[in-house]
Image: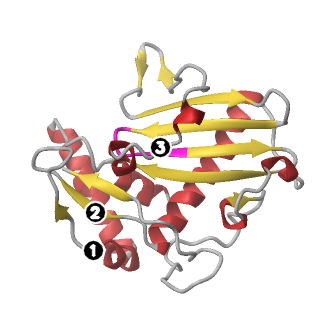
């Protein structure tokens, strides 16, 4: 899962140093070698310069990619919640998770009402160094309900959204296939995913990842 998310996070902007170029080449090679079903689903990029000169689009809304990225978003939601609150979500809780491509951002299809109420942006730091250009996140606590919302961005490639609660009932009418409960990673395997229908193969709306 981390390999696929790392692959998706490097689509845009273009690498600017030799090290960045080597990183993306290794990431692409790893995904091609280990996840052929996913590569077949993504297909070839299509030239599209509407938003970035010389850019293109890659169809990234198929069932395999959607499964991997929403699962990644859910796991990140649990992790950020523990980092922010110190809580471990119990068996009665869960997380409603989604992911958003940069193509959706260019088309103005992000959850702007949610983004407007988030707190300040945070990132990982080590001494005077940080990775704000690669990863940042924000959160907001529910005032009247026991739900905390998280928004995380990875470069300018994609973002994840997660609403976490100790009581899954607080997540309201969230679609079943986007609500994840503790223990959901047991038995999960990206390599085992195919295009069959089921828990990890539901027909999501097709977002697109912008490729430059």
User: Whole-percent x and y of residue 19?
Assistant: 21, 40
Q: Of discs 3 and 2, which sits in the foreground?
A: 3
Name the side, left or right, on which 2 lies relative to 56: right
Mark 2 to mark 1 CA distance (whole Å): 7 Å
Q: Is residue 74 above or below residue 135?
A: below
Give the residue pinned by disc 2.
Answer: 58
Residue lying farthest to the bottom in this orientation: 196
Name the side, left or right, on which 160 lies relative to 172: left
Mark with earlier residue (3, 2): 2
Name the image quarter holding residue 208. bottom left
Instruction: Tell me the SS state at disc 1.
Output: loop
Taking the spot 55% from the left edge, 27% from the top edge, the residue there is 116
> What is the number of the mark on residue 110?
3
> What is the number of the mark on residue 201?
none
The one nearer the camera, 93 or 126, is: 93
CB atoms of marks 3 and 2 within 8 Å: no
Give the residue pinned by disc 1.
Answer: 43
Instruction: Tell me the SS state at disc 3.
Output: loop
Residue lying farthest to the left in this orientation: 54
Mark with earlier residue (2, 1): 1
Residue lying farthest to the top in this orientation: 128
User: Whole-percent x and y of residue 136?
Assistant: 48, 31
The one nearer the camera, 22 or 64, is: 64
User: Whole-percent x and y of residue 31?
Assistant: 35, 66
């Amino acid at each position: 899962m981390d390999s696929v998310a790392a692959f998706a996070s490097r689509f845009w902007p273009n690498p600017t140093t030799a090290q960045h170029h080597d990183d993306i080449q290794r990431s692409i090679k790893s995904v091609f070698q280990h996840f052929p079903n996913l590569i077949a689903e993504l297909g070839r990029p299509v030239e599209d310069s509407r938003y970035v000169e010389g850019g293109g689009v890659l169809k990234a809304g198929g069932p395999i990619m959607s499964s991997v990225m929403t699962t990644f978003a859910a796991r990140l939601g649990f992790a950020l919640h523990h980092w922010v609150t110190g809580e471990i979500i119990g068996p009665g809780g869960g997380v409603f998770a989604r992911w958003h491509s940069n193509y959706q951002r260019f088309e103005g299809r992000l959850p702007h009402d949610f983004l407007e109420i988030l707190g300040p942006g945070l990132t990982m730091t080590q001494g005077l160094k940080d990775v704000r250009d690669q990863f940042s996140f924000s959160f907001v606590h529910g005032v009247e309900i026991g739900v905390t919302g998280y928004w995380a961005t990875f470069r300018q490639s994609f973002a994840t959204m997660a609403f976490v609660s100790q009581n899954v009932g607080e997540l309201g009418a969230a679609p079943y296939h986007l609500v994840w409960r503790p223990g959901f990673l047991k038995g999960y395997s990206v390599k085992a995913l195919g295009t069959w229908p089921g828990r990890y193969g539901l027909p999501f709306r097709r977002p697109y990842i912008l490729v430059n």
